[in-house]
Amino acid sequence: PPNWSKDVRWLVPPDSITVSSHSSNTFLQGIELIQVEHEPASRNTRTSIKRRTTIGRNHSISHRMSAVWEEEEDLPEGDQDSQRPRTVSAAGNANPRRPKGRDRMSHSSSTTTTHSRTVSLPTPLSVSAGSMDASTGYTTLTLPRASYVPSKKPGRVTGNVDLTRSGIAQTTMSTVSIARRKPHNKTKTPHRLREDVFTHLTFTSHMPPPSKVHSQQVLVKVWAVGLDRLDALLFADRAERNDGFGYIPGRSFVGRALECGWDVNGISKGDWVYGLLQVKKAGALAEFILVDRRHIHRAPRQSPTFTQEHLTLLSLSGVAAHRAVRTLSHLPPASRVFVLNAHAGPGLLATQLLAARGIAVTAHVPGGWGSGCERRARLAGAAEVRCGEIGEVVEGLETEKFDAVVDTVGGKNVWDMCRRVLCLSGQFTTLHGDTPHLPLPPPKAHFKSNMRSLRRAFLKQAGYQWVTPAADVDASGEDIRDSLAAVGGLAEEGVLRPFVWEGQILP
């Protein structure tokens, strides 16, 4: 197509003409348009002007767009012909030879001008470089990179998506994954270099975005990811294996739903969502992820005091705390519960849930008196706070004092110590079992946990319940989606509020 910017002509007075012979692409600076109003002319005059203009267009070699800039001066009638303005091309070259009809038309417009109004040229819109905030209104516009291609089988639902063609994603998506493989012969590596032989986590961009959404899946663009001790254990385990290359950690996420399967209910395209992936199928530290409908829910409404960081911790710690407290649903409001590590994580949220039910909570926090951990536990609703190591704190408690214990530390020694402070009909609920150092406990650990739970039915002993994060459904039949809906409603009511360390937020 013709480049109209090079063919714009301007009609200026002779004393203001500036001709540049060395540059043919120089634009005129500071030029103002003047809207010219014409007096009604006779029919013959209009006909002749129209005929001459048509003739000039037919003899033109290339299509050109012209603009007129005129300045009316108070001159005698006899001097108007001598002071006829000239035409200068936008490239800066004078063009004294013009079609005769076009010259007369400009002269006729000049002599019939009565009133003029100055119009400023509009400033072109700035182009965003991609680093601007979405609130400016430029980066939110998504333009497709290719034309729309209709489906070859319109009556068949395939679930195929092309994020690259639609302009939402690049040909590859960004991920944080393991970028180096484990060496085959580790004994040949010097001992002083074995710990630094891997650069485990690396920001990469070599994986293609998802291209198919099944009927029970949701395609999510990730905005924030939460990590905890279990994610660190899973990452360390995969980094030591030969098949750890390309592993993407992360289970808790917050994002926007891009596409939804036809069997997904409660979530629409464009909704803010949050969820918790399976332990064996982590991968939230990616630009786009596919999530099963049983592990995702619509996110609660955000506010200045409840941000995306709170949402990531709500799904990461809130689900575990909610399931642990559900094992104590039989306790009356006047019961007494002992919570370990009640200063952060699932322990803090479990304290908030129990205090909202009117249960007297005795919180254990590390550190000394007057620390931030103690203040957070008291703000969560703890009736009593004990500071120090777990063994020292449990030994200082009275025998058979509590109706339940919520263990957020794990280990067989914690179970043995807490049995003394539990009532005969008490309940011991743990989140990590006997093997907190393993990411995926062996089947033998689950067998021991089940045997402890069955002893209460035959012997008068305290109950035992292990709320494992690897289980999609808890003991009462509630899946991850139901737990997310429950904790999301409590967060909107102000009952649950995770604690976020500002120094541990990585942009």
Image: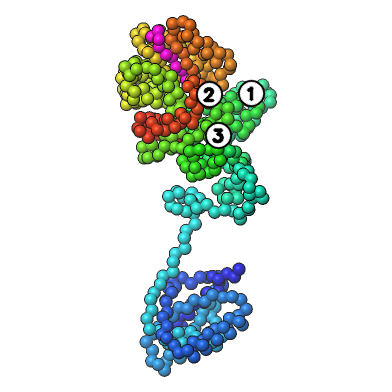
Task: Please state which amino acid type lies under the numbered disc 3.
Answer: Asp
Give the residue number, with chain letter if any, for mark 1: 190
Place residue 117 in its image quadrant: bottom left
Where residue 328 appears, x then y in whole percent? Answer: 41, 18
Q: Quadrant of the N terminus?
A: bottom right
Question: Outermost residue, front direction?
Answer: 155
Residue at the (57%, 69%) spot, across then down: 3
Give the residue number, with chain letter if any, for mark 3: 292
Per the image, label 3 sits on a secondary structure element best described as strand
Q: Nearer the viewer, mark 2 or mark 1?
A: 2
Q: Nearer the viewer, mark 3 or mark 1?
A: 3
Residue at the (40%, 72%) spot, across then down: 119
Residue at the (43%, 25%) spot, across then down: 322
Task: Please state which amino acid type lies under the numbered disc 1.
Answer: Pro
Q: CA distance from mark 2 to mark 1?
A: 41 Å
Q: State if disc 1 and disc 2 touch (CB < 8 Å).
A: no
The magenta region covers 423-431
Q: Which mark is residue 471?
A: 2
